[in-house]
Structures are given as structure tokens and as C-alpha cells.
């Protein structure tokens, strides 16, 4: 077993970590101490004489050299800002984020001789750095433990209890398992889940899932389980196909599910069940990713990143979005973030007008496409999705200079893309959106940045 403690300075990583290691009969390793031993000087001197980049380099090397098993490890407060460190720390480990409020941290580290990283007074610096680092802490953790008002012994005990029993109480796990029994899971997933939650004392595997109705044919479980295996993460990903998002979210809380991908028809409705929503997701009005830490559920939208990333080299162009549903909202938000002038064209013009108003775009009926001559076309309707073999546009609508992005990915080469290719347009497949939104989703849930090439290979 390898237990990693992350979090800001003053959250008790060293004191609680030493106690936890003692109880588990494992050595306690402190990455800051390893760095000081290797550098032959204390951390304030490394910062003063060599600068922060040199310190971060020592830190990377210290993390790379940690034993892969049989240790409790305390890490420096900035270690998980680097996704490469997160990848190394997470492999085969259980990662705990220790948390405390700004005032408590400032009080606990008040007399430290560590150098300032911002040049601001200590209390102000703690607040600023905590806000900046919080997203990275939440991504890199499997579990969150509050240390406010608790002794190091209390924190070690709580950590131990999570390691032994999982993050939720046995009573809520029984209720969550009751919910899972109603869902048509594969025999393999059912067996895995029973061994994970059926008996207290086996919480060594965490759970992630996709929630939708329907979603049993999603590509996500196969992709995520391959990613978990590749990065050595003790997780299983399954699909929760159920008509009521309220019931799904109750099960997510009861079972301590770490990450949830949300798909049709719940992307809007899920918002009211969450404890916090990222500002981009709030602006789009849809959440497709939920991450749980310490019983708190936070929602994000990664669909817009999936549309934006393949188009990032184009700025300020004129774009047309076909459709005015959820995918079109994510596309409009993405294109506006690239400073594009966007027209939303939809069968039901009223829906296009509503969307256009939210994102400062224009609206028009589908028939108006020919007058637009856009540089970028995004199809955000299901037209062309198997078994439909039609296209909303004809060859006459397309010019060689256009970039045509079809969000439909079954089949990868849709009738619209085949026409666009024939006309000499630049074409972008719907699988690109899937890959980039999944990459961002995996990042929110694990803190690991998967190279696009790895995802393409796995998809
Ligand atoms: P949605 O909310 O149901 O919206 C569908 C939109 O398509 C509506 O604006 C609808 O027009 C229009 N539409 C449907 N059938 C049409 C037809 N026969 N002719 C003209 N317009 C039609 O669906 P969504 O969530 O936005 O998803 C749309 C598509 O995006 C999906 O089918 C999927 O293929 C794709 N998608 C891909 C990814 C990916 O990762 N690549 C992710 C999400 C979605 P009305 O308003 O007139 O009904």
C-alpha cells in the first residue's frame, strides 16, 4: 500500500502522516526532507540561492524516486501543480487531500522561515495561493479530509478509517448498493462492485461511472478502464443507465463515487443536485462532469473544450453552428471564446434565437446557410448519425476554404464530412470532440494530463 498526503503547508501532512505510518507499520517519507538531504541545504536556502524553478526540479526528482509501494508520503504544498508529479504520485496509491481554512493555515505556519512566493504578507499569501491551488488539489485527490479543529491523531484515525471502510458509512453504502442492484450492469461489473462494497474492509478500488438514459452503449467505460489500467489507478468505471438523475446522484453520494460523466438527458437537470458548479458550465447551462471530494459534488463542462481544442488555431473567423440543443450551446461558447462571429441556424428558429441571445450570436433558419459563406461550420444536430445517412448541407453549400466539424461520431466519416472532403474543405471528425472532452474530464477526475495521441490510440 502507498498512501500519499497532499495539500497546503500547515494542514498536518507531516504530523498526521508520521502517526498514520506508525499505525500502518510503514516508513514515512517527506518529499521536502528528501529535497533538503539531496541539495545539502534547507528549503529557504534553495529558494534564496537557486530560485523556485531549481526547487521544483529537485521536487520532481524526489517524487520520481519514491518507492512504488509500502510507504506513507507527505508532499510539498505545490507538488501537485505539476501534472507529471500527479501521474507519478497517483500510480498504485491512495491520495488524501488534507484541508484547513485560510486563517488556521496562516496561524499554523505563522512562525515558519519559508520564503514568500508572492511577496505578500503571510495571511494574504495563504489566501491567494490556496485559491490558486485548490483546483489542482481537488483533481489530484481520491479523498478529502478536513483537519480544522482536529488533532493529528484524529486526522490519522479518519484517514485510516477511509482506507479500511471507504469514504462513506456502511449504512449509506448498503443503500447505494440497493440502488445499483436495480441497474442492468454487466455480470463482470456486478461482481466487481459486490466485492468493492459488499464487505466492509475492501475499499481498495474506487468507482467512477457514466450517468445517462440511455448510456449502456457508451464508449466511455472501455476508454476509462483502459486509462485507469495504463496509469495504475485503482478504479473501476461502469455505466449507470437510469431514468432519474436524483436517484443517480443519491447513489453517487452513498457510494462515494469519485467521478461521474453525465450525458443525455441529464446535463442540465443535474445542476440543481450539485454543491458547486464551475463558472464555464454555469454559463453554458450544462454539466457533463461531476467530481466528488469529501462528500462535496462539483460540476464542470468539458464538451466546450472538446469543440474548442481542434479549432484553436483559428481566431476571429465567421462560424455557423447547425442546431440549437446542448451540443450547440457548448459549440457557441467555444467559438465565442475563439473570438468568432457566430450564427446559429436551427430547424426551430425560436430555439436558435434564445441561444444566440445568451452568447451574443446571430440566429437564422437552416435555409439561410447559403447566404452566410462562413469560414467554420459546426454540425451540432444528430443528422448523419447512424443509421441516418443524410446531410443538412449539400455540396453546393460548401467551399474549399471552409473548415467543417461534425460533432456526430458514429460513423466517424459522416455524410456531411464526406461531402466536405470532396469539396476540398478541412474536415474535423466528431471523435476529436469526444477525445478532447474525455481528456479534460479525466484531468478533472484524476489530475493527469493524457496526451491526445494516447487517447486516439485507445479510442
Ligand atoms: P439535442 O439537445 O437534442 O439537440 C438537437 C438539435 O438538433 C436541435 O437543435 C434539433 O432541432 C436539431 N435536429 C434534430 N434533428 C434534426 C433534423 N432532422 N433536422 C434538422 N435539425 C435537427 O442534442 P445535443 O445534445 O445537442 O446533441 C446533438 C448531437 O451532437 C448528438 O446527436 C451527437 O451526435 C453530437 N454530440 C457529439 C459529442 C461528441 O463527443 N462528439 C458530444 C455531444 C453531442 P430542433 O430544435 O428544431 O428540434
Image: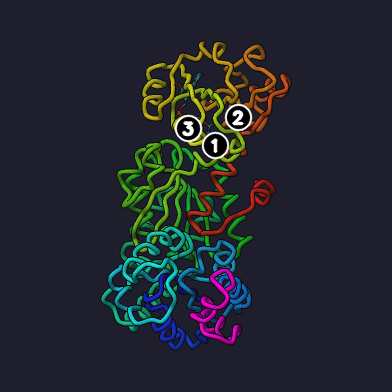
Q: Are marks 3 and 2 in contact (CB under 8 Å)?
A: no
Q: Are marks 1 and 2 in contact (CB under 8 Å)?
A: yes
Question: Number of callouts in the render?
Answer: 3
Q: Residues within 10 Å of mark 2 (few under 14, many from 20)?
A: many
Residue 426 drawn at (x, y percent): 68, 28
**Which of the two discs, 1 and 3, sits closer to the camera?**
3
Range drawn in magenta? 30-55
Vertical comparison of 93 with 314: above or below: below
Residue 223 drawn at (x, y percent): 60, 50
Q: Residue furthest left?
A: 149
Tell me: 338 left or right of 357: right
Residue, disc 1: 307
Quarter of the image for residue 310 reads top right
**50 part of magenta stretch:** yes
Circle 1 SS class? helix
The tag earlier along the polypeptide, 3 or 2, is: 3
Q: Residues within 10 Å of mark 1 (few under 14, many from 20)?
A: many
Residue 444 drawn at (x, y percent): 48, 54
Circle 3 SS class? helix
Q: CA distance from mark 1 to mark 2?
A: 9 Å
The tag earlier along the polypeptide, 1 or 3, is: 1
Residue, disc 3: 336
What label does residue 405 carry, if any?
2
Amino acid at each position: 500500500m502507498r498512501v500519499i498526503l497532499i495539500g497546503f503547508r500547515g494542514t498536518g501532512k507531516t504530523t498526521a502522516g508520521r502517526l498514520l505510518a506508525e499505525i500502518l507499520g510503514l516508513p514515512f517519507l517527506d518529499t521536502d526532507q528528501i529535497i533538503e538531504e539531496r541539495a545539502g541545504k534547507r528549503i529557504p536556502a534553495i529558494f534564496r540561492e537557486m530560485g523556485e524553478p531549481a526547487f521544483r526540479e529537485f521536487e520532481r526528482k524526489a517524487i520520481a524516486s519514491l518507492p512504488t509501494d509500502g510507504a506513507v508520503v507527505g508532499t510539498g504544498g505545490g507538488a501537485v501543480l505539476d501534472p507529471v508529479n500527479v501521474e507519478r504520485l497517483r500510480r498504485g496509491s491512495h491520495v488524501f487531500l488534507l484541508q484547513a481554512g485560510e486563517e488556521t493555515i496562516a496561524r499554523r505556519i505563522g512562525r515558519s522561515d519559508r520564503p514568500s512566493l508572492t511577496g505578500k504578507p503571510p495571511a494574504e499569501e495563504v489566501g491567494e495561493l490556496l485559491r490558486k491551488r485548490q483546483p489542482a488539489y481537488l483533481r489530484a485527490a481520491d479523498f478529502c479530509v478536513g483537519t480544522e479543529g482536529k488533532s493529528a491523531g484524529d486526522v490519522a484515525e479518519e484517514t485510516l478509517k477511509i482506507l479500511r471502510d471507504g469514504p462513506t458509512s456502511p449504512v449509506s453504502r448498503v443503500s447505494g448498493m440497493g440502488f445499483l442492484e436495480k441497474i442492468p450492469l454487466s455480470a463482470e461489473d456486478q461482481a466487481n462492485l459486490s466485492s468493492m462494497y459488499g464487505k466492509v474492509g475492501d475499499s481498495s478500488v474506487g468507482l467512477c461511472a457514466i450517468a445517462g438514459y440511455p448510456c449502456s452503449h457508451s464508449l466511455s467505460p472501455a476508454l476509462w478502464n483502459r486509462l485507469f489500467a495504463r496509469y495504475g489507478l485503482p478504479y473501476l468505471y461502469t455505466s449507470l443507465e437510469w431514468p432519474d438523475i436524483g436517484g443517480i446522484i443519491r447513489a453517487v453520494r452513498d457510494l462515494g463515487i469519485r467521478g461521474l460523466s453525465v450525458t443525455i438527458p441529464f446535463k442540465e437537470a443535474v445542476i440543481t443536485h450539485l454543491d458547486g458548479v464551475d463558472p464555464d458550465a454555469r454559463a453554458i447551462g450544462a454539466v457533463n462532469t461531476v467530481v466528488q471530494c469529501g462528500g462535496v459534488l462539483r460540476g464542470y463542462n468539458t464538451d466546450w473544450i472538446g469543440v474548442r481544442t481542434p479549432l484553436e488555431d483559428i481566431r476571429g473567423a465567421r462560424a455557423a453552428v447547425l442546431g440549437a440543443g446542448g451540443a450547440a450551446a457548448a459549440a457557441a461558447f467555444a467559438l465565442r471564446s475563439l473570438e468568432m462571429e457566430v450564427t446559429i441556424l436551427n430547424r426551430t428558429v425560436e430555439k436558435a434565437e434564445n441561444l444566440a441571445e445568451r452568447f451574443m450570436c446571430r440566429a437564422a433558419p437552416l435555409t439561410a446557410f447559403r447566404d452566410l459563406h462562413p469560414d467554420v461550420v459546426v454540425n451540432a444536430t444528430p443528422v448523419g448519425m447512424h443509421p441516418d445517412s443524410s446531410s443538412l448541407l449539400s455540396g453546393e453549400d460548401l467551399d474549399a476554404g471552409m473548415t467543417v466539424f461534425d460533432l456526430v461520431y458514429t460513423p466517424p466519416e459522416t455524410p456531411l464530412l464526406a461531402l466536405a472532403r470532396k469539396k476540398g474543405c478541412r474536415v474535423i471528425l466528431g471523435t476529436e470532440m469526444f477525445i478532447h472532452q474525455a481528456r479534460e474530464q479525466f484531468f478533472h477526475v484524476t489530475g493527469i494530463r493524457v496526451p491526445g495521441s494516447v487517447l486516439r490510440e485507445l479510442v
